Image (spheres, helix red, strand yellow):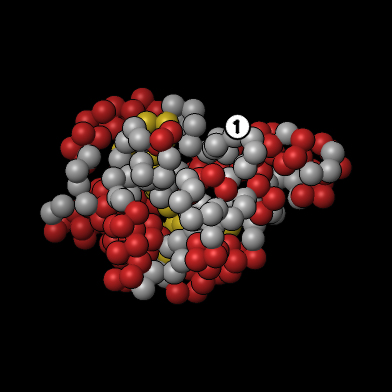
Amino acid sequence: MTAATTASARNFRGTHTEGRSPEELRELVSHVGAELELAPAENIIEWAVATFGERFCITSSMGDAVLAHLASKVAPGVDVVFLDTGYHFAETIGTRDAVEATLDVNLLTITPKQSVAEQDAAHGKDLYKTDPDLCCALRKVQPLAESLEQYDAWATGLRRAETHNRVIAPVVGWDAKKGKVKVSPLARWSDEQVEGYIAENGVLVNPLVYDGYPSIGCWPCTRRVAPGEDPRSGRWAGTNKTECGIHS
């Protein structure tokens, strides 16, 4: 990144307020995806902020604050979107609050259209048991898609090392369903790199990570993982479900 680009990244508020068309965005990705594949995570975020300005955001599930921490250094005040499903562990909400209090980011909490009680009334109690895919669609996929409508691109903490389904996740790619650019600055990071960054920078981590929950979702569908088990095995245990649908 040039000095000019970095300066642009650090002063992005109020820039690029007009959205690009899906065709323009898709064409943009086709040119830069390969160029940024081996770039450091900070440079990938710098490119995204310089390119999309305030039409770019970070999403975080608050398993840790690595991506939010990186983004806050590159682009202070960047939007960080957190989806409160109504089923989060108290520790996850606490991590969200700590991120908002300690990092230079604009934290936005979004919620589903229906409360848990309203969803129970409409679809029957504990939809996560009877139809977990529908529950995820109503409480995760739809709210996130609606919250991203004001952006042209968003960054996720997706890493290829987390699950086999994510091996081919591009650093910068095109999400055809959402019609937006999907950026995964940490895609190439190993578990060791994440742990090293956390230790070196004192990054906030959800306490559940140290209590046997390496992958944290909604409390009804997340269990502890025994040493040596696949880190994702605690999500939707006992079912064939492996993803909530946000990344599909």
Mark count:
1
- Amino acid at pointer 1: Asn
User: Which quadrant of the structure image shows residue 125?
Assistant: top right
At 37% from the left and 31% from the top, the residue drawn is 174
Q: Residue 159: x percent and y percent?
A: 37, 45
Drawn side of residue 59 relative to residue 123, left or right = left
Q: Residue 89: x percent and y percent?
A: 64, 60
Q: Residue 192: x percent and y percent?
A: 31, 57
Drawn side of residue 2 relative to residue 19, left or right = left
User: Which quadrant of the structure image shows residue 67?
Assistant: bottom left
At 27% from the left and 52% from the top, the residue drawn is 41
Q: Residue 105: x percent and y percent?
A: 43, 65
Q: Nearer the viewer, residue 205 or 27?
A: 205
Question: Quick one: label 1, few (<14), some, or many (20+) residues within 10 Å?
Answer: few
Q: Nearer the viewer, residue 163 or 117?
A: 163
**Residue 206 in view of the camera:** no
Drawn side of residue 91 relative to residue 70, left or right = right
Drawn side of residue 3 relative to residue 45, left or right = left
At 45% from the left and 74% from the top, the residue drawn is 102
Residue furthest left in the image: 2
Which SS class for mark 1?
Answer: loop
Depicted 85 relative to depicted 28: above or below: below
Q: Which residue is mark 1?
A: 240
**Residue 224 in view of the camera:** yes
Q: Nearer the viewer, residue 203 or 25?
A: 203
At 29% from the left and 57% from the top, the residue drawn is 193
